[in-house]
Structure formats: C-alpha cells, structure tokens
Image: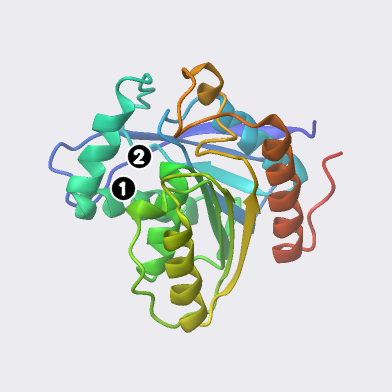
Amino acid sequence: MADLIERDVTYTAAGDNEATALQGMLIAPSGAANGPGVVLIHDAFGLGEQMIETARSLAASGISVLLADVWGDRALPGQEEIGQYIGAMKENPELWQARIAAAHDAAREQPEIDPARLANMGYCFGGASALEYLRLDGRVIATVAVHPGLDLVEFDWQPREARVLVTLGAIDPMATAEHRAQFDAALSDAGVDWELDLYSHTKHGYTSEGAKFAPENPVIGYHERNAKRTKDRYEAFFREIFPELRPTN
C-alpha cells in the first residue's frame, strides 16, 4: 500500500450542548496537498477498524479521507447498544446534522483537501447521514451511500448539481421498494445524477464485519460477494469523479 499520513482530528459541533469531543481521523496519501477529499461517515458500530481500513484503501488511490466521529469520544457501540445511539440522533436531527456538518468543516480545513473537490460517503446510518447532508444543501460534489437506512431520510430535495451512488440489498427492510421509489422521484425531480445498485437476496448491513456475528434475523446479514461488488463500484465511481486517482489493485 502507498505511503500514508494518519493523524487524529478533534473537532466540535455547533450547538452541541454536551460539548462532546468528536475524535475524527485524517488518512491521506503522503505528500497530498489541496487534492480530492472524502468525508467518510461510519456505520452504527462507530469509527472502528473497518472504517479505518476503508479509508486507507481510498487514500492508497489518491484520496484524502476525513473519518467522522458522529457518536463522540470515538465510541464503538455493541450490537445491543446501537439502537439507542441511532435513536438519540433521530430524536435530535439538529444535533445529528450539526455533527455531520462539523466533520465536513473539519475536512475543508485540512491542507491535504481541496474544499472544491470534497465528496462524502457513509455506511448504514452513515449513508443516511451523507444523503441528508447533501439534501440539506451540503457542499459536496458527490455522495456514496452504502446500504443507507432510507427510513431515516427525508425526500424533499431542492434542485442541485451533484452525483449520487447508492447501493442496497433488495430485501433490506430499512430501504423498501416504497422507500426506493420515493428516492427515485425525489432525486430525479431535483436534477441529481444518481445511480442505485440493488443486490438480490441481500439484507441491511451487508458489508458490515459486525453483521457477520449477528444472530440469523430478517433485518441484517453480511454478504461477502456483494460487499466486494460494492467496493469495486464505489472505487470506479470515485475514479469518474476524480480522474487523477490511481488503481489500488
């Protein structure tokens, strides 16, 4: 893997009454300056090793990645705790979006990142967060949302220029056919250049290493082949957005 820069980036969100320390991380190619950037928003399991490895892979291609810490204090909730973490953000959307916006502001302050070439990307809860940031007029040129909870997002999009890639499992109860139809209509009406990749026989959280160990259930399930397909697709998508990127294989 290419030589990488890794450093902690601590930031705070406007209006966060708890003054929670958001302990993000920058992973960038060695020598990067004013280049393409991505804000990577973690899934329900927090800013853990899988997110860090994802960022390293993106950085090896030439992207500087700011990993967001939405939960604060770099918390890593267990399977039994994630509901309360997501619920707290859903019940306080102003705080939720303030923390997402703060991560993007922190990314723009990094010398490795060109603010005009900033995209965002998220998994699961993080995918919904990335979409909501863009919907609320967030300043990114592209968004990747991997198995986002479409039940967490709104569909009142205003016209904008952006590119969006969403990947979903066809039997994800958090992104039903009805949700997908609303997504289609909302982004099409807003003039967004969007793509939806739908994988058969695939549940929610299909890329998550944490989901590998969840008991068999109708909601969440790891799917190794489709996780690999998703990685291949978002890497190609970013090469379309940032033509200077180098192959990682």
User: Which disc, if any, is residue 99?
Assistant: 1
Residue in the picture at 35% in, 39% down? 70
Where residue 36 sits in the image (x, y, percent)? 65, 57
Answer above or below: position of 75 versus 154: above
Measuring from the top left, give residue 80's x and y in whole percent.
Answer: 32, 19
Check the image and report above or below for 223 versus 230. Answer: above
At mark 1, the secondary structure is: helix
Of 174 and 7, which appears nearest the observer? 174
What label sits on residue 35 in the rendered view? none
Q: Quadrant of the N terminus?
A: top right
Give the amino acid at mark 2. Val
Identify the amino acid type marked 1: Arg
For residue 22, what is the image quadrant? top left
**Are the residues tagged 1 and 2 within 8 Å (C-beta)?**
yes
Q: Is residue 249 left or right of residue 234?
A: right
Q: Quadrant of the C terminus?
A: top right
Confirm whether residue 31 shows in the render.
Answer: no
Q: Is residue 204 above or below residue 108?
A: above
**Residue named by callout 2:** 70
| Residue 73 in view in this figure | yes
Residue visible at 38% across and 71% down in the picture: 137
